[in-house]
Amino acid sequence: QIYLVESGGGLVQPGGSLRLSCKATGFNFRDYDMNWYRQAPEKERDMVASITSSGVTTVHADSMKGRFSISRDNVRRTLYLQIDNLEPQDTAVYYCNTRYRGRNYWGQGTQVTVSS
């Protein structure tokens, strides 16, 4: 059974930073590309960033470049998302995702709220 468990979210003031984590079990983590998505209230789920299985190549959505950084630790089977200089519009539930044998898998999400 594949599990993706996100953590690291919370309430943070504008300008602050967070590092989100996603622990993966149930599949060979090092063999699969991974993604972060986010979903703000009453909006669609949007891709934030992707990383290849080796971690060599990363892609960040245009609006996320500069403040968001995806990375992974294949030994710890963990995906990360560093978010700096947080803004109120970053408030959303953040999900990690992978596609395994033709099926999408999602974690339960971690809530990020940016407010003073």
Image: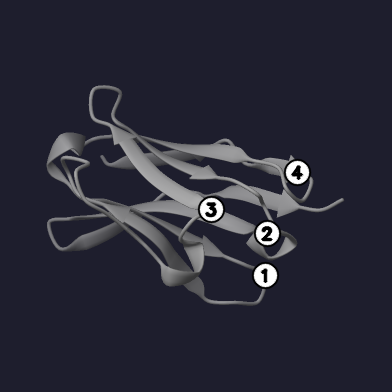
- CB atoms of marks 4 and 3 within 8 Å: no
Reading the image, the residue beneath label 3 is: 67
Instruction: Give left or right: position of 12 versus 77.
Output: right
Whole-percent x and y of residue 57?
Answer: 21, 50
Q: Which residue is farthest top? A: 75
Q: Residue at x 52, y 50 (%)?
A: 109
Give the amino acid at mark 3: Arg
Q: CA distance from mark 2 to mark 1?
A: 8 Å
Q: Earlier in the sequence, mark 3 or mark 2?
A: 3
Residue type at numbered disc 4: Leu
Please name which of the two marks, 1 or 4, marks the residue nearer to the observer.
4
* Residue tagged 2: 91
Closer to the eye: label 3 or 2: 3
Query: Badge 4 local density, few (<14 within 10 Å), some, or many (20+)?
Result: some
CA–CA distance between discs 4 and 2? 9 Å
Amino acid found under the numbered disc labelled 1: Pro
Structural distance between the alpha carbons of marks 4 and 3 = 17 Å
Task: Tell me the SS state at disc 1.
Answer: loop
The residue type indicated by label 2 comes to Thr
The answer to whether marks 2 and 1 mark residues whose Cβ atoms lie closer than 8 Å is yes
